[in-house]
Image: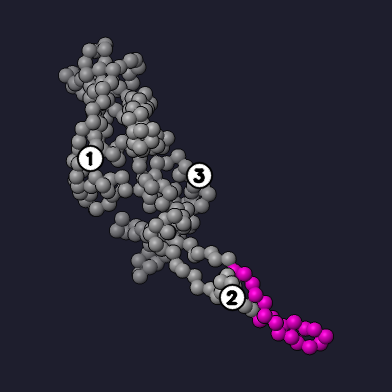
Amino acid sequence: RWHGHVSVKVFETLCWLGPHPEGKYSDDEMRQADGAGRRLKFVVYEPITAAYYEGFIRSHKHLREVLGLYGQDMIDIKRNGGQKTTREMLLFICKYRMDVVVNKKTADGVDNGPDAPAYRIEFQSDRLYQQDKITPINAAEDDDDLANSKKLIDIESARGKKIVRLVRRVSGMLLQLTIFELPSAVVQAANLSVPIAVDTDEDGDKAAVKEKENTVNGFAEVRDVTERLIKHPPPAFRVVAYDPRSK
């Protein structure tokens, strides 16, 4: 890689986002699906060769991948009035995520011809996983949280906690099942909570009445004992099934 000083200009342009072949979009892409999106064009001037080189951040999804795990808060344009945040974001990309690469080989490792530009612009990027990420396969609960703590996951808060992975035969098909416990915020937003019916006492508090026998001086006495109940809503789970035969 090249080391030195360059001059960078950034232009905001438009890109067209066609429909996803499987109809799957993250929340960030949903509002741009099958329509116009945001694209950033970086024009880099290198003083030794006295030439300009261009690099592109193709879409909002690509921007999130370029910013990586520790730069996601810079996308929020409402913070600090918007303009300052955009400037911080571009400075972060230019300083930490943009590379000026000697252009002897292509990104695929193929030798370039003698007429190829001396350099090309590349951006470091982290893979953006979807919220149904199940890897690492054999990790669950705290081990899964630790393994994915350095991963960039779309809508990570909606993924939930991975509880267990097992193999079961369902309707004659042998499936690999991964079960996540959903957080309460996701359950409430999706209206998945189930109301719990319990008896109430005269004050309207939740209560349960149990009959217990009490022996006093050799005589059996039946008395009612009122116990307070704490309402605990049942957990909601998401089950991700994988068929290894159909893939």
Q: Earlier in the sequence, mark 3 or mark 1?
A: 1
Closer to the observer: label 3 or label 1?
Answer: 1
Q: What residue type is labelled 3?
A: Leu
Closer to the observer: label 2 or label 3?
Answer: 2
Q: What stretch is highlighted in magenta?
A: 211-229
Do we see residue 120 in this rendering? no
Q: How far apart are marks 2 and 1 (CA)?
A: 59 Å
Closer to the observer: label 2 or label 1?
Answer: 2
Q: Name the residue under label 2.
A: 202
The circle on residue 37 is 1
- Is the stretch drawn in magenta largely helix, strand or loop? strand
The quadrant in which the C terminus is found is: bottom left
For residue 104, what is the image quadrant?
Answer: top left
Few, some or many residues within 10 Å of mark 3 (<14, 14–19, 20+):
few
Please, is residue 179 above or below residue 170 in the view? above
Q: In percent of the image, x 31 and y 48: which residue is there?
A: 26
Is 222 displayed left or right of 235 in the figure? right
- Judge whether residue 215 is colored magenta: yes
Q: Mark 3 points at which residue?
A: 146
Is 120 displayed left or right of 66 in the figure? left
Q: In percent of the image, x 51 and y 52: which residue is there?
A: 141
